[in-house]
Image (cartoon, rainbow, N blue to C red):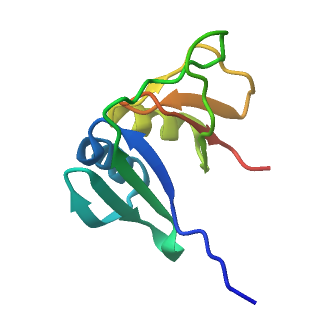
Amino acid sequence: MTTLRLTATVLDTPDPPSLARFYRHLLGFETVSEEPDWVVLRGPGGTGLSFQRETSYVRPQWPATGGGQQVQDHLDIAVDDLAAAVDHAVAGGAVLEEFQPQETVRVLRDPHGHVFCLYLPD
């Protein structure tokens, strides 16, 4: 049987190095490869995020409203202190969304508009 192993999530962006800097700040991941059109970050245990240039990138709408680019996926990031994690994310350039659907989750956007959630695990 063939072995399959998910190694990274890839985010499209008009500026891969700049978005990688944000996630390096947010998560503490290390840069393992950086080119103008492609950046790879790795964290503990091999978890990875990659960023590729997309010149036609459109920021998604959230919550979804008819007609625009809708969020098709987002990152869930477990934290042990929600308020401190939000402050850390905002200090790095994230924006806290106005609509927050759950008490133990905070929805934010990275500097290029990708939605991500900080949450307190059960």
Of the pair 62 and 3, the residue shown nearer to us: 3
Q: Which residue is painted at 51% across and 62% down in the image? A: 8
Q: Quadrant of residue 106?
A: top right
Q: Position of residue 22 (x, y in %)?
A: 33, 43
Farthest residue to the bottom: give it: 1
Q: Which residue is painted at 73% across and 22% down in the image? A: 101
The N terminus, quarter of image = bottom right
Horizontal side of 19 relative to 5 (left or right) equals: left
Q: Position of residue 73 (x, y in %)?
A: 62, 39
Of the pair 87 and 75, the residue shown nearer to us: 75
Q: Which residue is painted at 23% across and 61% down in the image? A: 34
Q: Quadrant of residue 30?
A: bottom left
Q: Position of residue 24 (x, y in %)?
A: 34, 53
Farthest residue to the left: give it: 36
Q: Position of residue 77 (x, y in %)?
A: 59, 48
**55 up-or-down from 96: above or below:** below
Farthest residue to the top: give it: 66
Label tally: 0
Farthest residue to the right: give it: 122
Horizontal side of 82 relative to 88 (left or right) equals: right
